[in-house]
Image (tube, rainbow, N blue to C red):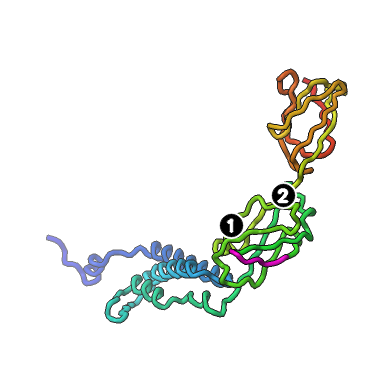
Amino acid sequence: MSEPQTPNQSKTAKTPRKNHRIDYVIFFFFGVVTIIILTVVAMKDCLSDPQIRFFQTILAISVGGLVTGVPGFLDVNYKGWIRAGGGLGAFVLVLLMKPLSAAASPDCKSFDLIVNIETSNKDHSAINNAQVNLRIGSHQIGPKTIHENKVLFDRVPREFFADSIQLIPVDKRWQVTGQSHASAIESTEINFTIVKVVDSTVVSGYVFDHRKKAVENAQLVFGSKYKVLTDKSGFYSIKMPYEPGEAVRLLVLINNAKVEDRNQYISENIDVILADK
């Protein structure tokens, strides 16, 4: 025959033990997400409507998760056709209140666009003080001057936020070969790579063996496709569409056997001394 349970024992047996550690982890996670969203929105001068909807939805989910860890009751009844409680009620409430809509208010009429510019040969001094224009959709802004590889296009009308962006150097000797984003709606800091347009560079020099003796009929291959043979004095000369300072692969072959394979910076004079095999 079992002993009768006391009231305290009976209450303990019927009430399951709650795992507070899991509640703390969930509360902390959604709290961090909420802080991150609010920080990102606060740092942005302007947000597009799709970005506002995205952040608002994530914020609603995060607040709903936070509410599940807070004691108390919440009941949301909207116009008689939406009714929810607890975390789901908080989620619905945030979506209805649209707390982030101020970030896309009519007062936000412009945005700043930061343009970072790199050159193919990393010679940044060549582009400092050069001027560039920015084409956004069918509109052109600029010219602006490059300082320390950066250009700030400030107070760009917000109506261009989702339009395609193209950088146009004023000096036609430069051309853009790549960019990190197509529009400001993706990022308000865009990286562009530009190269100097050259008709050709004449490269000449001598090929010597390890004893400093001229090597005749050595074949030099630049960039896997520009080939030249040395004469009796070991001299060669070739015209190539490379920019001085640009790195290319250089192969040296003698009797179709590879004796040299290296990266070579282009210059007007390149002498090659072969290692002793």
Which quadrant is the N terminus positioned in?
bottom left
Q: Please, which residue is most extreme toward the top here?
A: 255
Q: In which quadrant of the rendered view does residue 274 lie?
A: top right
Q: In which quadrant of the rendered view does residue 191 lie?
A: bottom right
Q: Which residues are magenta?
A: 137-143
Residue 174: x and y in percent read 73, 52
Q: Which residue is mark 1?
A: 181
Q: In which quadrant of the rendered view does residue 9 lie?
A: bottom left
Residue 89: x and y in percent read 34, 74
Q: Nearer the viewer, residue 223 or 19?
A: 223
**Distance of label 1 from label 2 (alpha carbons):** 18 Å
- Label 1–label 2 contact, CB within 8 A: no
Q: Please, which residue is most extreme toward the left here?
A: 1
Q: Is residue 198 above or below residue 48?
A: above
**Can you see residue 211?**
no
Q: Is residue 178 above or below residue 52?
A: above
Q: Which residue is mark 2?
A: 195
Residue 132: x and y in percent read 72, 61
Q: Is residue 142 magenta?
A: yes
Label 2: element kind: strand
Q: Residues within 10 Å of mark 1 (few under 14, many from 20)?
A: some
Q: Residues within 10 Å of mark 2 (few under 14, many from 20)?
A: some
Q: Please, which residue is most extreme toward the bottom here?
A: 79
Dot label at residue 119: none
Label 1: element kind: loop
Q: Is residue 35 left or right of residue 142?
A: left
**Can you see residue 59?**
yes
Which quadrant is the C terminus positioned in?
top right
Q: Nearer the viewer, residue 139 or 214?
A: 139
Q: Is residue 212 left or right of residue 92?
A: right
| Type of amino acid at the residue the image marks with label 1 | His
